[in-house]
Amino acid sequence: MENYFIDKICKEFSFSRITASILIERGFSSIVDIKSFLYPSEKDLANPYDLKGMNDAVSLIKEHFSKKSKIVIYGDYDCDGVGAASILYLAFQKNGIISEVFLPNREEDGYGLKLDSIDKMLLTYKPDLLITVDCGIQSVEEVEYLQQLGIEVIVTDHHEPGASLPKCICINPKIQTEYDELSGAGVAFMLISAVFGKKEALEYVDICAISTVTDLVPLVKSNRIIVSLGLNKINSDKSNLGLKCLIDFIMRKEDKNVIIKSSDIAYKIGPRLNASGRISSAFKSFKLLISKDITEINQIINDLEIENKYRQDLCIDTIESVKNMLLEYDLSTHRVILLYNEKWEAGVIGIAASKIAEEFNKPTILLTKNNNCAKGSCRSIKGINIYDVLKSNSQFLNNYGGHEMAAGLSLDYRNINPFLESCDTYIYSNYPPELFKTISDNAFNLDDISDVNIQLTKELSLFEPFGMNNRKPIFSVCVGSLNFSPINSYPHIKYELTKNIRFIGFNKIDYLEILQADVMKRIRFSLNFENFRKREYATCFVLDISLKSFDIDNHFLAYNDLSRYILTNNPETMFKNPYKPNDYFGRIVLVWNYNNFLLAMENYPNYILKFMKLDSFNTFNTILFSPNKDETFEYFSEIILFDIPPKNYIDHMLKKYSNITLVSRTDIFPNNYLININQNHLNTTYSFLRKYLPEIINSQDPKIIFSFLVSKGFTITIHMFKLCCIILLELGYLKIDTNTQVWSIAISSRSLDESIIYNRLKN
């Protein structure tokens, strides 16, 4: 049956079987549904009147319009709340309705309707009707307070409702069983569609698209249509003036024809609109979206740029602070990361939590001081619903709200530790530990790398816009030797499959040797279609490389083993991890010899297998085969040396970590190498280094140095180059500064016979 449907899709759309299979894998079961997905149309938008409360809301709004009542739009300080407020404001203004907008301050007011914030709003505005956007669904007491003051209320929101709803008109897809999930701006878009018609709502679809992508709601059904139509408008000359100027400033300084994609919204546009709400006042971004004054718009854009840079710096500092705190956190026991620091900036802890959750593969909750309580942001990992975690432990919380992947909360300081323990217990009981094992998304397996072609890339471009629940397809293919090469003197690599198809590996130069080697490995990558000067290109971005077979040539194993005789980094910090590993977390096994690696796999059958380096800070139990000399393991509770390393390496590790275990077994194999290295290799390497090291700006990373030498005619392979370098270091002909790590040529009179490394390679 599946093959029949694949054939049907291929015939209907002229697609490859790969594209057809991906569509089926994503749950499409009819040609009609596929057409709606591939070609989003405004006619397929959900009917706004199918939202509960919409009829009553429209009647009440029109009643207040006719009476020329005072209307206040009460929003939120993030991009979604700002976008929703601007949609209502602009639509009301265009149709002759005067309204005011109140946006709470993140620091002073916090999220949503609060009694103090309402009082602040009432000092300036005296509304007859208050319409919330992107908030209010849990504000039962606050709505009652407004009504006692004679103010009518319409709540529009998209967050999870509480046990009871406010006793007013509520519009929220989450309070009914059958409706497309929307962002806060999406709900505002539907409200305008109901009040003034779909044509009027589409005037603001570009703003709605920005909010929808930025707020991480699923890009399916109406959300997908909104973002698709919004991108079309953004890429035309009809976009909102403030948005157009912002995008021109960010992305179109050199090329006015740059096509904006959903990824640009997520990583470039959205963060800048969010920056004002995080750093100063969200009203700044709101003014950008409603202003017609170019001078004012350009001033706001400059302010947002400064604030976004400040936000980025704050975020980097916060992430670094979190990582330092995690050195003393029991990552082996805790299933959730929960940390408090009163110095953290509330506006960036959500971004920091997202990064930590991604790198450590655990749900992350970061808290900071807010008046007399702790307030924070949560970010989750695939498979764990963080809102359910909060809801199930709400007895410890003052407030909470959010989605499956992101949420906010506040709690009393005394409840932080009990809340952590309760969250751990809940996750232990409801989620299997294997969920924490890998970070990678599922990938579609290709039979051969030749399956990658321009036509496939063009077909997949129809899946745009990408986002939550419509991720960019990830592919996996098993390959042998691929002729990757360095990109100039950068730590990046490239491989040209054809003249129009290239693979790019950013910061993947560590894997250059293994990619070039005739050993089976699996590479994961994404595809990107590009059209430049009427030529079509496909760029494949390499995400990670894993080995299918660990039976690797001695050249690869020799360097990582023997370089431990040359330790250029003296440990300045002693990492003391007092926590114990368990069956799932906290233990890393280091092994350099292939036969010992096989023994380790027998002893630890359920461990993650990694080669050379760790690609995250995930502390799920791991075997690391042939680890790089400078790889660090400070987040693990126990480090097992399952091999016979050089004594000076053992001494080095004992000085750096307090949790080293040396395996003492009679069946451990010694590391012996027979490699055809000779004095000519050493002379050539020394000659090139002596001539070109002064020209190399970044003379710290051996891969970058090697790339530069290759550009000057150096022909020795990278693994032989690296072996020669550690011998030159050992004999004193090469020097690496212990502080700067910069390489330089030195003078020495030692002979090759004195090299322990050279003799190990030859014997």
Image (cartoon, grey):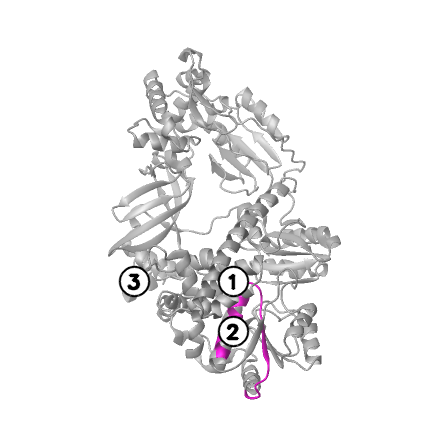
Which residue is label 1 attached to?
A: 215
Q: CA distance from mark 3 to mark 2?
A: 39 Å
Q: Is residue 35 left or right of residue 426?
A: left
Q: CA distance from mark 2 to mark 1?
A: 14 Å
Tag 3, which secondary structure? helix
Residue 10 shows which numbered tag? Answer: 3
First reached walking from the N terminus: tag 3 or tag 2: 3
Q: Residues within 10 Å of mark 2 (few under 14, many from 20)?
A: many
The answer to whether residue 70 is visible is yes
Q: Is residue 65 left or right of residue 151?
A: left
What is the magenta range? 66-93
The answer to whether residue 466 is visible is no
Pick the residue in front: 142 or 14: 142
Badge 1 amino acid? Asp
Tag 1, which secondary structure? loop
Q: Are marks 3 and 2 in contact (CB under 8 Å)?
A: no
The residue under the point 45% across, 69% down is 293
Q: Position of residue 719 (x, y in %)?
A: 38, 28
Confirm whether the magenta stretch covers residue 492. Answer: no
Residue 355 shows which numbered tag? Answer: none
The residue under the point 35% across, 26% down is 692
Relative height, residue 622 to residue 674 (above, below): below
